[in-house]
Image (cartoon, coloured by chain):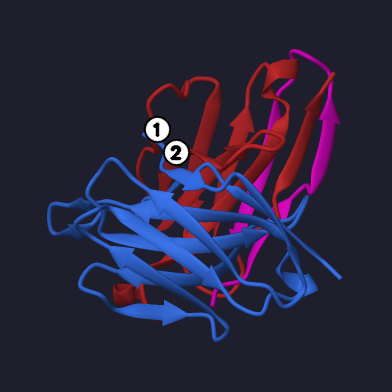
Chain colours: A blue, B red
Amino acid sequence: QQPVQSPQAVILREGEDAVINCSSSKALYSVHWYRQKHGEAPVFLMILLKGGEQKGHEKISASFNEKKQQSSLYLTASQLSYSGTYFCGTERGGIGGATNKLIFGTGTLLAVQP
Amino acid sequence: GAVVSQHPSWVICKSGTSVKIECRSLDFQATTMFWYRQFPKQSLMLMATSNEGSKATYEQGVEKDKFLINHASLTLSTLTVTSAHPEDSSFYICSVYLGLAGGGRYNEQFFGPGTRLTVL
């Protein structure tokens, strides 16, 4: 089942902050965050691993609550270049570890205005 | 990271014809690739997992006889949309999986630029 993201869309002024949430009904091994510009492929932002390890982008942070099966992406001091659609990609655990398959969330459209 | 290419970047075809989309890993050997489909303003939907040298694993609801996947080498996976119809028009994206065992920083997928298919 597809993870649900909230909000569906958000409009920001440059310099404002935003939080994007991703909620899954399944237990997760990791959560990956991507940003996609219109007509382009998704670009990797960061990954959050079960156990709290976090790797990725310099100016964007995220959290992963394994018990609640939720992740949040924090965008601070937004820039025009942050505009796009954000997707969480959730990876479930399997026998021996991760399944390596990503199930993408419903998406959040972010528009940053000058 | 891995560099992934797709060909063609866009294709327009008539209903009933078959279309082949190529996904290439340009700088490392990929035993696992994934194929996604994305309709306008929607999320990426995983179609199948392509494994080099073995049959692809399809997600529930994806017709394996309609979407033929061949992963004949470690650098190339192909998706053939057979007897395409207008409802197959979509953005098809492949990704290459690079895990820790393969020398990646962590389990990560690198996406190709996508192929836009329009069926008339």
Q: Position of residue B84 (x, y in %)?
A: 70, 19
Please say if the residues under marks 2 and 1 sit with CB atoms less than 8 Å apart. Answer: yes
For the point 70% across and 24% down, the residue is B18
Dot 1 falls on a residue whose secondary structure is strand
- Pick the front one: B35 or A54: A54
The amino acid type found where label 2 is placed reads: Ala
In the rendered image, the vertical position of residue B53 relative to residue B67, given as above or below: below
Q: Position of residue B49 (x, y in %)?
A: 41, 44
Q: Would you name the residue on which mark 2 appears?
A: B48
For the point 58% across and 43% down, the residue is B78
Q: Quadrant of the N terminus of chain B?
A: bottom right
In the rendered image, the vertical position of residue B23 relative to residue A34, given as above or below: above
Distance from the alpha carbon under mark 2 to that under mark 1: 4 Å
Magenta stretch contains residue B64: no
Position of A34 compared to A39: left or right? Answer: left
In the rendered image, the vertical position of residue B83 relative to residue A70, given as above or below: above
Identify the residue at the far left of this view: A95
In the rendered image, the vertical position of residue A28 relative to residue A12, given as above or below: above
Please give the range of residues in magenta: B1-24
Dot 2 falls on a residue whose secondary structure is strand
For the point 62% across and 32% down, the residue is B80
Q: Quadrant of the C terminus of chain B?
A: top right
Image quadrant where residue A50 sits: bottom left
Magenta stretch contains residue B9: yes
For the point 35% across and 43% down, the residue is B54
Position of A52 compared to B116: left or right? Answer: left
**Residue B84 seen:** no
